[in-house]
Amino acid sequence: MREDCVEQKGIVIKKQEDKLVVKIEQKSTCSSCHARGACTSLDKKDKEIEIKSKDTANYNIGDEVIITISTKLGMKAVLIAFVLPLILIVLALFLSIKIFSLSQSLSALISLLVLSAYYFLLYKQNLFLSKQFNFTIKEKITE
């Protein structure tokens, strides 16, 4: 049984022996806007995704493709990037103020330091995390 997946259109911009780099346009709220065709919104950002593939010979630079990632992995990414840091901030604030009876400003500074340390550790684990979050190419778009 196939997992639920999130799909996104992209364009191959770089090709190497064992991987492709695909550029996708990330649009925050543009998809539901009635003026999206004429808009030059600043919310549009291009992202480059590295995709490991054994059949890179089937793709050329400029090819449009559909890439996927499982919804489960997407939820894991949200947990790591947003939920855990929020829990750490609240926990650090609570412990600093209630347990250690520190001032609010010092508690806020400590919670920011905890958050900084968390994101630094996350940055250092980049290689490990990149192996867990794998995008795949579902299909090549031919017109």
Image: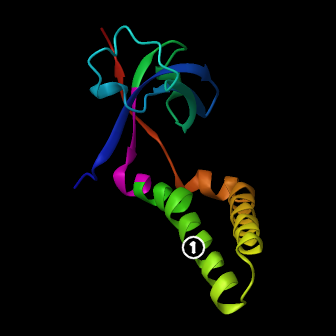
Q: Position of residue 52 (x, y in %)?
A: 55, 39
Q: Is residue 39 left or right of residue 91?
A: left
Query: On screen, 88 above or below 68?
Result: below
Quarter of image, res 9: top left
Amino acid type of disc 1?
A: Val
First to last magenta residue range = 66-74
Point out residue 86 in the picture as x, y percentages from the top left corner.
Answer: 55, 65
Residue at the (54%, 61%) spot, across then down = 80
Q: Position of residue 45 (x, y in %)?
A: 54, 26
Left or right placement of residue 36 versus residue 94 in this view: left
Residue 31 found in image quarter: top left
Q: Which quadrant holds residue 129?
A: bottom right
- Badge 1 is on which residue? 90
Mark 1 crowd level (few <14, some 14–19, many ≥20, 10 Å Cα): few
Identity of the residue drawn at 25% across and 51% down: 2
- Looking at the rendered image, the quarter that the C terminus falls into is top left
Q: Report the front residue among 37 and 67.
A: 37
Q: What element does badge 1 sit on?
A: helix
